[in-house]
Structures are given as C-alpha cells and as structure tokens.
Image (spheres, grey):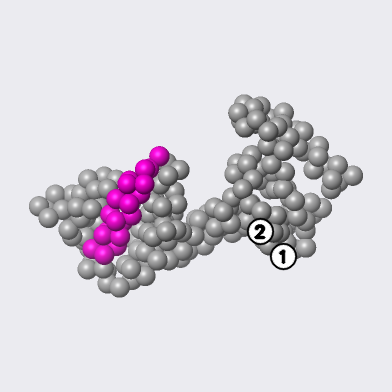
C-alpha cells in the first residue's frame, strides 16, 4: 500500500524488495519522501475489526498466518520479516515506527494497519465505524432483542470483531443480546462478561459439522425458532 502511494522499499543492491511478507527480510532502506503530498491534507481513519499489533505472540503472522495456511516455520519467518521492516522504518521516520508497530490495529490485514498508522491514521474499531454508518443506535432503541452472529465465536471475536462490538453497544443500552454461530469456542463465563445472554451454535442443532456447512439455511431456521421460543414468546 505504501509503495503504491509513493514509498520505496529497497534491497542492498538498490532493487525493490520482492512482494509479500517474506520479501521484507531483504529490506535495506525505506524511503518515504515520495509519498503523495495530498496525504498530508486529509484525515485518515483506520477502521479495523481486530486490535492486534504487527508482530509478536498476538501479531499478524502468529494469529492470522495459520488461518491462511502458514506453517510454524512460515509464521516465524513472516514475524521476523515484519519486525525487520519496522526496524528499518525507524531509520526513515524515527521512534514512531516502533510505537506504531506495537499499537492496536497494526496487524490488521497482514500489516496494512501498520502502513495506515505510519500515514497518520487514527485507529477506530471497525464495528464502531460501521454501527455509525448503519444507524445502529436508533435501531437499537426500537429493539426488544438483539441477535448477532459469526461463523466461529472464539477468542478472536473478543478482539474487536462485530459480535463483540454489537454486544457491548446493546449491553450499554440495556438490551439483551444473543449470538448465533456455526461453532462455539468460548466458555459461558467469558461470553457473559462480553455481554452475551445466550449463544446458539448450529452444532447444538446438528452435531455433524459437514451438514452444518452444507445445510446452513434450514438449520438456521431451526435455531431461529429456538431463539423465538426462548425470548419472544
């Protein structure tokens, strides 16, 4: 992203680094002097549904790399390459390069968040931005029950993803929240602290995960009937 906006990332021989995270291991110099000057005239907002830093145990490679097929060795290489990237950028922009690397949202989209922060973007949880855009607050005023959901309700959900944001907003307004999900991987006490009154995983209605995927529509209808019986009748 930064390259497209005019930055240059070069190897020791003066050639551009290869695309992709691993190519950053060869980075020797970073030159941000060619960034589009119009960037200084606008206010940027980094709207992210995750608050992960760039590197480390909760960074982009460690948390999201395996989801995309990265092996443990790949994760180690990518994390080292991104850490090197941030270190080289310190020479170009100063100590703020390290500060931004450790900031919430830097690890979003494989490090796109880090690039946005370097450009002066202000981080906002993506769900807050979307709830504003969608007019969630007035809709919430009219609601008797809030139903949210996600494919897998797990630890990542709690790091700024939509269901957690919806639950927090609804709880603040005194509204009950339930979640429908394909897979549930959080204990009841954690769900309660996050604001969920109850959860409805599809696997409770159909233990066969392959059937949950293949027949999600009809199974969701059955789950919706349970929600209605439990809360709206």
Q: What residue is rendered at 29% in x and 56% in y?
A: 80
Taking the view exactly as shown, the residue that stands out farthest to the left is: 13
Corner quadrant of residue 113: bottom left
Corner quadrant of residue 194: bottom right
Q: Provide the residue span drawn in magenta.
A: 69-89
Foreground pick, 108 / 143: 108
Corner quadrant of residue 81: bottom left
Q: Which mark is residue 136?
A: none
Q: Main secondary structure of the magenta part?
A: helix
Q: What residue is rendered at 73% in x and 61% in y?
A: 171
Q: Left or right? Give the position of 194 relative to 120.
A: right
Foreground pick, 79 / 173: 79
Taking the view exactly as shown, the residue that stands out farthest to the right is: 233
Quick check: 53 above or below 156? below
Which percent across, then down, holds residue 140? 74, 56
The residue identified by callout 2 is 190
Is residue 223 inside the magenta stretch? no
The C terminus: image quadrant? top right
In the structure shown, which secondary structural element does the residue marked by tag 2 occupy?
Answer: helix
Q: Could you classify mark 2 by the number of other residues whose Cα lies within 10 Å: few (under 14), some (14-19), or many (20 or more)?
A: few
Give whichever of discs 2 and 1 has the lower sequence position.
Answer: 1
Which percent across, then down, holds residue 136? 68, 55
Q: What residue is rendered at 72% in x and 43% in y?
A: 200
In the structure shown, which secondary structural element does the residue marked by tag 1 occupy?
Answer: helix
The residue identified by callout 1 is 172
Q: Left or right? Give the position of 22 relative to 44.
A: left
């Amino acid at each position: 992203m930064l390259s497209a906006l005019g930055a240059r990332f070069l190897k020791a021989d003066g050639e551009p680094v290869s695309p992709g995270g691993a190519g950053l291991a060869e980075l020797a110099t970073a030159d941000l002097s060619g960034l589009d000057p119009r960037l200084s005239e606008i206010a940027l907002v980094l709207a992210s549904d995750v608050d992960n830093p760039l590197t480390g145990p909760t960074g982009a490679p460690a948390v999201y790399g395996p989801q995309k097929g990265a092996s443990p060795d790949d994760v180690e290489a990518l994390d080292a390459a991104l850490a090197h990237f941030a270190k080289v950028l310190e020479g170009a922009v100063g100590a703020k390069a390290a500060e931004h690397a450790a900031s919430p949202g830097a690890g979003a989209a494989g490090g796109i968040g880090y690039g946005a922060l370097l450009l002066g973007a202000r981080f906002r949880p993506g769900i807050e931005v979307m709830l504003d855009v969608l007019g969630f607050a007035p809709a919430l005023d009219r609601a008797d029950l809030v139903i949210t959901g996600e494919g897998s309700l797990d630890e990542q959900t709690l790091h700024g993803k939509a269901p957690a944001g919806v639950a927090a907003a609804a709880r603040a307004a005194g509204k009950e929240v339930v979640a429908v999900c394909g897979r549930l991987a959080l204990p009841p006490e954690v769900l309660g602290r996050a604001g969920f009154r109850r959860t409805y995983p599809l696997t409770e209605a159909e233990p066969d995960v392959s059937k949950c995927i293949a027949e999600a529509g009809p199974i969701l209808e059955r789950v919706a009937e349970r929600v209605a019986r439990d809360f709206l009748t």
